[in-house]
Amino acid sequence: MSSQIDHLLNETRHFAPSREFVAQAVAGADLYDRAKVDREGFWAEQARELLHWHKPFTEVLDWSNPPFAQWFADGELNVSYNCLDRHVEAGNGDRVALLWEGEPGDDRRVTYAELTDEVKRLANVLEGLGIGHGDRVAIYMPMIPEAVAAMLAVARVGAIHSVVFGGFSADSLRARIDDAGARLVITADGGWRKGKVSPLKPAVDQALADRGSGPQESVEHVIVVKRGENEVAWVEGRDLWWHDVVPAASADHTAQPFPAENPLFILYTSGTTGKPKGILHTSGGYLTQATFTNRVVHDIHPETDVYWCTADIGWITGHSYVTYGPLANGATQVLYEGTPETPHPGRWWEVIEKYGVSVFYTAPTAIRSFMKLGRQIPQSFDLSSVRVLGSVGEPINPEAWVWYRDVIGEDRAPIVDTWWQTETGAIMISALPGVTVTKPGAAQVAVPGISVDVVDEAGEHVGTGNGGLLVITEPWPSMLRGIWGDPERFVETYWEKFADKGFYFAGDGARLDEDGDVWLMGRVDDVMNVSGHRLSTAEIESSLVAHEATAEAAVVGASDETTGQAVVAFVILKESFLKAHTPDGLAAQLRSWVGEQIGPIARPRDIYIVSELPKTRSGKIMRRLLRDVAEGREVGDTTTLADTAVMSVISAQVK
Ligand code: WTA
């Protein structure tokens, strides 16, 4: 990380928007002025202009019981109606909603009218199964149109979805199903990933397997889309094929209005403890900010743009910038099932050429891996349609930023580096294309209507030229409304640190440059960011110690050229295990163990077997020192260690 930070500090290049871009841009500088004069009025205006309200709201923000906010509380809307029916009613039913590309090269175009029809049928199926207001539905699917339809159908009937990334293991799925008490799971037999079918239904079966009396018994039905054509087991009475039940259902379904604060979804994300947190989002405020930011940050012109966000729907980016934002805006978007390098390393650029993608939104880790392969690959495709580029998920180093602009944007398309979190629900800090003079590596400015600051430990503004902690100083429409089932953890995690100021603590370090622009510096807590995916050190540590061989484990995020950070684990083996086994091959075994327990993304890059871990006198592991070892640096200050000799022992064992 430190060499990356040096680069950030020395970066001085600027890119002003072109006159042609400014002339057609959705956003103008006036947005900032309007929001400054009346922040709440500004959001009310966005909510009214961008969404259809079955019952208009009269209240904007209720902050009488912080940190529990309510936005537009007396208004009523239907999220699915806003993403579908109203576009059809406005005469845009023939507009393509999804340009779907399967990994093996099969494709489908789904218009707004067709997607609406499918969602109405599925909504009828859900209601027929007794799923309605407030029920939880787990979605564990590949990137296929049915995944988007499933989210919208759940929202349509006022139920709550919990999308679980298809790369997560059966164990992770089970934990999420249990925590939310899901009554229904929507899945597929399998989906295409890396040139082969990756099974999903078998993981659902495993997650639901009878283990006695777990709360997973809450699941009554499983709806299965046929996609992978892999063989699947079947539980009669519980399992239903999508192709049997959905086409047979009626395509008449009237969307009922629900209160603005009706829960829309739970999305689990890693925190600083072993147990993932179920981040809860509600309807009206969330949809307002997702729609607004998609429009102004990505400069969406729904009639002409072809938009593509490469995120999986299993992450927040896929919720806000695949399903909700773009569909509420009536945009046409590409949905791609597979991985970027399958069947060849130019696959993404081929998709851009094939569909004429004009707005492209991806993660720095992908850009860095393409950079490594060389510019010849993208340059052998026609990328002239690209006019806006977005980045999300982790800090983007200036070299990758400039490469992205030069090679993918052909030195013409502006880049927006967007900072936000699962918890914030939508983009919070970003340049506006056509307004902001961009700086490689900086997310720069809060979007209109959002207030952020960089403060010291006492919550005082650090001033330009200084670093500190990123906070959000005012409530925002798409803010999380809580952690599912754990209001105390919500208050403690995000609001306690700066309780006297009422600031939301994001967990990120940041710096203000001379112009007051924000540069993100990475997490300041025990959350790692690997390829733009959030992982918790504690969660991987508990997985490692659950293995019979492990006595103790410490995990750190070490800087990695491609993935941003990589998981590095230090493991102490049990004496009893060593008496009966040799440690040969154990590191590899532990790697795959973590992969099975949590999912392949959590697999440590390196596992070092050591005899001790660096601890303070109070027994806290000093991860900072282990990070020094993992990154091959001289080990820093060890004076607070209980045993100062321990680091030389560890360093020797790692070599
Ligand atoms: C990091 C993803 C720097 C940050 C939308 C945050 C970023 C965490 C950026 C949230 C960015 C996201 N620049 N860092 N543009 N975007 N992050 O919940 O550390 O998966 O706290 O949401 O990713 O990750 P999450």
Image (cartoon, rainbow, N blue to C red):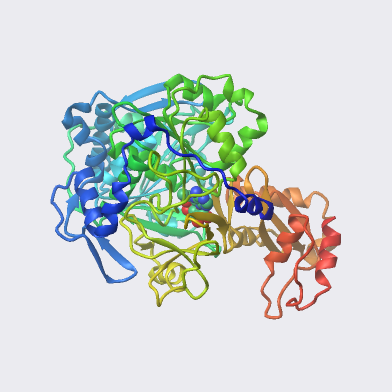
**Which residue is at the front of the view, 493 or 400?**
400
| Residue 244 spot, x, y in % from top left | 32, 30
Q: Is residue 580 above or below residue 77?
A: below
Furthest residue toward bottom: 617
Q: Position of residue 371 (x, y in %)?
A: 63, 34
Asked whether the viewer can see residue 286, the reply is: no
- Residue 334 occupies quadrant: top left
Residue 324 is left or right of residue 523, and the answer is left
Label total for image = 0
Quadrant location of the N terminus in the rendered image? bottom right
Viewer-proximal residue among 329 and 116? 329
Image point (68%, 58%), residue name:
547
Residue 273 lies, in percent from the top left, at 55, 65
Quick check: 55 above or below 348?
below
Q: Nearer the viewer, residue 261 or 38?
A: 38
Which quarter of the rendering shows the C terminus? bottom right
Q: Is residue 55 visible?
A: yes
Q: Residue at x 73, y 62 (%)?
A: 626
Residue 348 location (% of width, % of height): 53, 27
Using the image, determine if residue 402 lies above or below residue 459.
above
Which of 463/288 is in front? 463
Compared across the picture, whether 234 is left or right of 535 comes to left
Please, is residue 341 above or below residue 393 in the view?
above
Q: Is residue 496 left or right of residue 84?
A: right
